[in-house]
Amino acid sequence: MRSGPLATLAAVAAALVACSPEAGPAVEVAPAEMPAPVTVPSSAPVIGYGCDGGGVASVQYIDAATARLFYKGTTEALRLAPSPRGARWVGETREWRTSEAAGVEQATLSEIGPDSVATTVIARCHRPVPGRAAAPVTGPSPALSDLPPACRGPQLALSAEGSDAGAGGRSVTLSLRNVGTRVCSLSGYPGVALVDAEGRPMADVRSEPVQGTSAQPTETVVLPPRAKAWFDVRWTVIPDETLGPRPCTPATRLRVTAPGDTSPVSLDQSLAPCNGRVRVTALRGVEDPDVAARAAAMPPAN
C-alpha cells in the first residue's frame, strides 16, 4: 500500500475530480452499427427514362418503398417519401419525382440540400406509360452496368457465421465482408475449393451450385464498406455405395473466390464431405433466408 506525500496528493486530486461540476457519470459508447447490404433482386425490372440532352436515367423499383437510381455512372439508393402529388423518391444526395400526364410519365432528377429539400434540377426525363403511348424512349437500353464494381478478393474477408447438421447432411453459413473503403457488389455463386491438412487443393472434391428457383432468383448484393453477403456450403456425411469406394476425405481449409474473380480468400474450416462434392448456394443479402421469408409472409400489424 502506498503512503507518504505522493499518495496524499493523488488522493486529493481524485477527490477534486469527483467533486468537479463538470464530472458526470461514465457514458457508454455504443459500437458503430454495421451497415446493411442492399439487395437488388434480378427479377425487379429496370425502367429507362429518356432525358433532356439525349441521356438516360434508369430506375429499378425494388419494392413499394425502395428503388435504385442509375445515372451517368452513379448509383443511388432511394426510399419513397411523402408527396402531395405524384411519387417522390429521396436518397442521400438526390431526389427523383415522377408524375403522369397525357400517357407520359414525367420525371425530374434533382440534387437535395439540408432537410432533404430539392435544390438544383439535374435532368428532366420521361417515358411512355405502358399500354397508353407508343413513342419509344430514346437512348441506350437500361441495364445494371452502372451498379458498383464487382467485389474482388483483396477487399473481402471470409468468416464462418454458423453451422447446421441433419440426418446425414451438414452445412456451414459463410460471409464475405467488404473490408475495403469503396462500395462493391456481388452476384451469383462463389467459387469454393477445399484444402487438406498438407495445404494441398483437394482436386477430387468438386463444388456444385445449389440452383435457385424462379421464386428465389439470384440477387445482386451491394456492399458498403463493412457490410456482408452470405452463402452456404452443404455436404453429406453418408457415402453413396453406388459410386464405388470414394472415401469421405477430411479438409481443413476453404478457399473462396467471388463470382468472376480469381483472387481467393481463405478460412480454416474442418469438414469431411462424402461422394466427392460440396454444394454452394448463391450469395444473398440476409444471413438466414428462411427468417426473411417468414417475415415477408407475416400479415401487417393492425
Image (cartoon, rainbow, N blue to C red):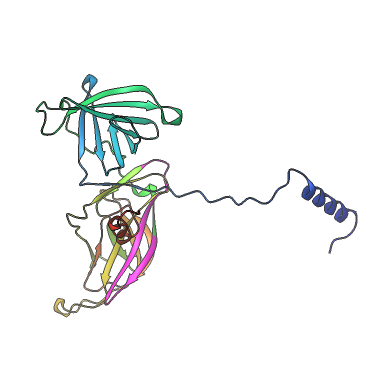
Task: Name which residue lies at 22% across and 78% down.
Answer: 239
Compared with residue 219, is residue 235 higher up or lower down, i.e. above or below? below
User: Picture coordinates of residue 115 (x, y %)?
Assistant: 45, 31
Q: Residue farthest to the right?
A: 4
All told, the count of numbered labels is 0
Residue 184's quadrant in the figure? top left
Q: Position of residue 302 (x, y in %)?
A: 35, 53
Q: Residue furthest front?
A: 302
Residue at 29 percent of width and 74 percent of height = 166
Relative height, residue 121 to residue 82 (above, below): above
Seen in the image, is 116 located left or right of residue 73?
right
What is the magenta range? 160-183
Between 123 and 196, the one lying in front of the other is: 123
Between 286 and 10, the one nearer to me in the picture: 286
Horizontal and vertical percent for residue 144? 23, 39
Magenta region, main secondary structure: strand
The reply to whether residue 251 is in sight is no
Residue 64, placed above or below residue 296: above
* Lateral position of residue 73 relative to residue 133, left or right: right
Task: Say above or below: 167 vs 182.
Answer: below
Q: x, y percentage for residue 164?
A: 34, 70
